[in-house]
Each structure stands twice: as C-alpha cells, then as structure tokens.
Amino acid sequence: MAAASALGKLGDESGINSLKSALSDEDPRVRQRVCMALGEINHPSAVPALIDRLSDPNGQVRHEAAIALSAIGTDQALGALKNMMDADNTAIRRIAASALGKLAPPTWSSRWRRR
C-alpha cells in the first residue's frame, strides 16, 4: 500500500501499469489505495481499469474508483459515473452522486443531460 501511495503522490505516469495490476489484489485495502493513487496520478489510461472496479465486491473500493474517475474527468469516466446513477442499488447511486458532486458544475453539467 505504501508503494501505491508514493506513486500517487509523485503523480508518476510510469507507475500506472504496476498500479493497474495491483487492482486485482485480494486485499480490498490495497485495491482501495490503488484507486486513490490512480486518481492522484490523474491519467486517462487508468479509466478502463477504474471502471472495472466500479463493480468491485467491496463498497470502499467502488467508492474510491468513482472518486478517481471524477478526478480524471474524461467523457468515458463521466459516462460510467452517470450510468451508476441508474443502478437499482441505493448505495451505488450514492457513490456515483458523491463522485459527481466532487466535480465543478461546468465540468459535467453539459454531459449530464439524459437523452
């Protein structure tokens, strides 16, 4: 977990692949910290791996993945968060709302409209 924290704080893009592979660690605390580090690095190449973690069995991992996606803010990331708002599960909708709430309205408001 310390390595994930260090890479995240450095913002070093070269560590992204190592971090993405750690997202499959059996310890949810490791997966949670890796999501946080990927959000701190803030690189679009992490988006697909973070989207995969939105279905993690651990709620804290899902939450940190959503927050990381909101930090990265690509159309793909925001689309995944928007889709979470349609979930039947209230907890999942809360995670999405929390992540979307961390964005400034001009960043997401034009993308939020339902079709």
Image: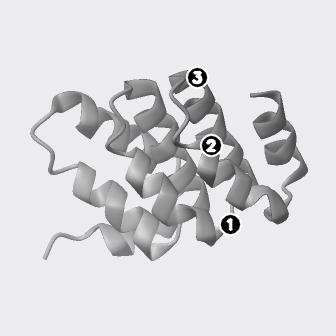
Task: Kindly indicate the quadrant of the structure image that contains residue 93.
Answer: top left
Mark 3 is surrounded, within 10 Å at the Cα level, by few (under 14), some (14 to 19) or many (20 or more) other residues, namely some
Amino acid type at mark 3: Arg
- Side of 1 relative to 50 (left or right): right
Q: Mark 1 vs mark 2: give the one in front.
A: 2
Q: CA distance from mark 1 to mark 3?
A: 22 Å
How is the model colour-coded?
one colour
Please state which amino acid type lies under the numbered disc 1. His
Kindly state the secondary structure of the residue where label 3 is placed.
Answer: helix
Circle 2 residues within 10 Å: few <14, some 14–19, many ≥20 = some
* Residue 85 sits above or below residue 108 on the image: above
| Circles 1, 3 touching at the beta carbon (< 8 Å) | no
Closer to us: mark 3 or mark 2? 2
Mark 1 surroundings within 10 Å by alpha-carbon count, few (fewer than 14), some (14 through 19), many (20 or more) = some
Give the Cα distance between marks 3 and 2. Answer: 11 Å
The image shows residue 73 at horizontal and vertical percentages of 54, 65
Q: What kind of element bears circle 1?
A: loop
- Tell me the quadrant of the picture where the C terminus can be found: bottom left
Whether residue 105 is visible, yes or no, is: no
- Residue at horizontal 69 percent and vertical 60 percent from the top: 17
Q: Which residue is mark 3?
A: 29
Residue 99 in picture, x, y percent from top left:
45, 44
Task: Look at the numbered discs 3 and 2 and tell me whether their residues touch, using CB distance below 8 Å.
Answer: no
Q: Which residue is mark 1?
A: 43
Residue farthest along the left direction in this orientation: 88
Q: Secondary structure at mark 2?
A: helix
Question: Residue at point 51% right, 67% down?
Answer: 107
- Residue 22, image x, y percentages: 62, 43
Specify which label sits upstream in the sequence, 1 or 2: 2
Residue 22: which disc?
2
